[in-house]
Amino acid sequence: MYADARSGVYKKLVVAPDGTLLGGVPVGDAEQYGTLRPMTGTVLPVAPGQLVLPAGAGGPVALGPSALPDEAVICSCHNVTKGAIREHTTLPEVKKCTKAGTGCGSCVKVIGQLLPQSRDAGLCGCFAYTRSELYEIRPHPGDHLVRGPPRLTRARGGARR
C-alpha cells in the first residue's frame, strides 16, 4: 500500500500469500491500471511494493503490456486476450474484429501499446501523410507566391490548382 495525502495518491494491491494478484485500488494515479488489471489472478512477476511505490522509494518497475502472457484478458468487457489483439495491426481493425475497446474504453491505451508501431505514423490513422512528408510539402519562407502545394497534389494523384 502507498498513500500520499499531499498529492492525492493512494495505491493498494491485494495479493494472496502465493503472490497472486487478487485486486487493487489506484486513486489519483491510475497509470498502471491497464497493465495491472489483466494480471489479476496471476502471480506478479515482481514484488507488489515495486508496482505501487514512487520512483526513488523502491519503484516503479517498468512493467508494460509486453510482460503479460498471451492468455491475459486485456478487454474485460468483451473478454479479449492479448493474443487475440496481437493478431491485428491497427486499433480500428482490433475494434472491428474483436470488439475490444468498444465497451468502457479503459483498455484502449494498452491495446495501442500492443499493436506494432510504425516509425513515422503521421498525425493520425486517417491522415495520409507522415510528419516528415508534411514538412517537405509545407510552404517555406519566400514561397508566398505559391497558390497551393503542387508536390502534395501530384504525389497523391490529385488535380493541380
Image (cartoon, rainbow, N blue to C red):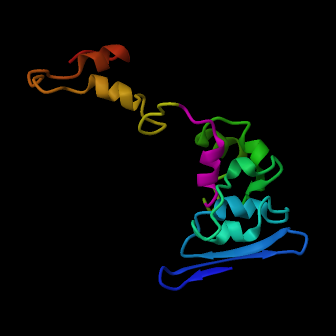
Which of 122 and 54 lies nearest the eye of the viewer?
A: 54
Which of 136 and 5 lies nearest the eye of the viewer?
A: 5
- Is residue 84 visible in the rendered image? The answer is yes
Quarter of the image with the N terminus is: bottom right
Quarter of the image with the C terminus is: top left
The residue depicted at 65 percent of the width and 65 percent of the height is 33
Magenta residue span: 106-118
Which residue of the protein is positioned furthest toward the right in this rendering? 18
- Give the quarter of the image for residue 23: bottom right
Which of 64 and 138 lies nearest the eye of the viewer?
A: 64
When the figure is inspected, residue 159 is found, relative to residue 126, above or below; the finding is above
- Is residue 76 visible in the rendered image? The answer is no
Q: How far from the left and from the top, in percent, is residue 87?
A: 74, 36
Side (left or right) of 2 relative to 145: right
* Membership of 116 in magenta stretch: yes
The residue depicted at 72 percent of the width and 61 percent of the height is 77
Q: How far from the left and from the top, in percent, is residue 134?
A: 33, 28
Side (left or right) of 61 relative to 79: left
When the figure is inspected, residue 62 is found, relative to residue 154, above or below; the finding is below
When the figure is inspected, residue 71 is found, relative to residue 121, above or below; the finding is below
When the figure is inspected, residue 152 is found, relative to residue 46, above or below; the finding is above
Q: How far from the left and from the top, in percent, is residue 109?
A: 59, 53
- Give the quarter of the image for residue 117: top right
- Give the quarter of the image for residue 124: top left
